Image (cartoon, rainbow, N blue to C red):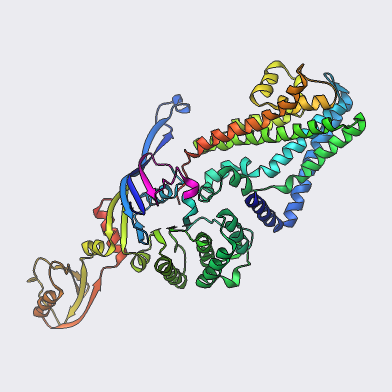
Amino acid sequence: MRYIYHAMKLNLKSIAQYRASFLMQNIAQFVMVGGEFLAVVVLMTRFTALGQWRAEEIMFFWGVMQLTFALCECLGRGISTFAGYVGSGDFDTILLRPRPLMQQVIGHRLDPRRLGGMIVGGGAIALSCVRLGITWTADKLVLTLLAAAGGFFLILGLFLIEATVSFFSVRSIEMVNVLTYGGRSTCQYPVDVYPRPLRILFTWVAPFALSMHLPISHVLGKPLFDVPMAVVWLAPLAGPLFFLLMTRVWYIGVKHYRSTGT
Amino acid sequence: MRFLEAEGLSKTYIRRCKPKDGGISRLWKRDTQVITALQDASFSINEGELVGMIGPNGAGKSTTVKLLTGILTPTGGTCHVDGRVPWLERREHVRHLGAVFGQRTQLWWDVPIHDSFLLLRDVYSVDKAAWQRRLDELVDALDLQEFLHTPLRQLSLGQRMRAELCGSLLHAPKLLFLDEPTIGLDAVSKLKLRAFLKEENKQRGTTILLTTHDMEDMLALCQRVMVLGRGKLLYDGQLEALLRRYDTVHTLRCTFEGEADLSGLPQAIRHERDGGAHALTFAPGEIPTSEVLAHVLACGPLREMTLKEQNIDHLIARMYEEMQL
């Protein structure tokens, strides 16, 4: 932990070297995600409901996804840009250090420029709470946090797919981004608004529905699947499990690392 | 068991490429091509040795270093370093290992090098007091004082290489890998770096394996040399013995007063005209220099002469040629 902490600190120090750039990129992120937010708002004023969901409820789902994804891009930058280190041979340096590899990959890079995205996501959640008049109880709060945490690990796990593919194919295939960025765009809305194939994909393959939508639906008081409460509490675990599984696969990939000529 | 022992170490890659002909099927058909980066290399290194590795580009030097550091997993053979298999016990292995790759930085680009060194202390979990002592030593030996708090990106190439070396030695590794450490350095920096490496090897007994294209590095640092070519270990032994094997050619350039008849020279002396001068090439192992001189003096009144030893780069080029690299 001490190592991760120091690595992160060093990362921040690096970024502090380019203050203007940092500020500009944050503003850019803010504007970009803010634009998406406005699009959601516009859509919602036109079609006041989507399936069983009211506009404000959709905004809640949307906000949690934005916040979680921005957090992943911030803390998981090392994983999401990992294919680049394989291509350039920088992974050599990581292999030369006596620390667990995954720890180093995560500590390798940090991207606090995603702050803008997090603010918009948090704002959307706050706004939706006010409009819906949610009465916060301890278990609602915990469920929301679990949804965010489950989604966090799930997205990191999805980033790992591309990272693993990069060991085998020098030019990373865009295909693998379908689940990551496609998942974000699709699953910022609850899974039940989609046709069956997409529902299956995002419940059983990339389990956004289990780790995020199910707990959130209980927070909003409109349970998604007809399952006992115990399952609802355990469902967000799908995220960390997915991450662990992908980590194992990634470690297999490490054995196939080819490095580059010097 | 020796400190480092490699047995039949091999690494092959499979490269997929598009077939050269065959119309539309090129879109999905792929030919596979097996590339041998290293083939059946066996060698061992004792603790405290300073070994040089040479060979033309693509000879397998980097592959060997990467196998020994545990970066790559071999496709055949095995090796032990200090009793450990690098790619199986990576973390324990690299804890006692330092590495500097001439063209790649291991420190953080945008922060002062001292900050990088601090993080390396955590990376290797070095005791604070021991780390500080070692840092002071290295800062002193490598002359880092004046730019210890300057970001890496603002350093010159020579300064950067010194900083890299410091970073790789802070945890007092038993084994140090250097991949072309003097590449791009000016003469003074090169000399300093060589002196430092020699000292590090002698004083602390650090085992050093270095690859280089700079033959001066070799002459200055290494007694033992390994020659690699096309993925094979072609020579492993004393540098001097290797040079003796090839360093057989001297050239004597001489001019005479008036015309001289050199047709009577023995076979062992190759004679070429070079403008007004004569270039006589011979191997001291074959015919002693004194004998050559006697022959030359017998040819006519000598005005001027110079004796030149063949430059080591030429030697290596000849060696590569003979080994058909």
Q: Residue at x 60, y 69 (%)?
A: B147
List x then y, in percent, for residue B37: 37, 44
**Residue A105 on the magenta span:** no
List x then y, in percent, for residue A1: 65, 48
In the rendered structure, which segment of residues is drawn in magenta? B73-92
Q: Residue at x 31, y 55 (%)?
A: B227
| Number of marks in the rendered image | 0
Judge left or right: residue B47 versus residue A230.
left
Taking the image as drawn, is residue A161 in sight? Answer: no
Residues B101 and A171: in front is B101
Judge left or right: residue A156 versus residue A90.
right
Judge left or right: residue B221 versus residue B270.
right
Q: Residue at x 51, y 55 (%)?
A: B104
List x then y, in percent, for residue B236: 28, 55
Taking the image as drawn, is residue A166 in sight? Answer: yes
Q: Is residue A105 above or below residue B279?
A: above
Residues A184 and B116: in front is B116
List x then y, in percent, for residue B157: 52, 64
Residues B228 and A38: in front is B228
Q: Is residue B240 above or below residue A136?
A: below
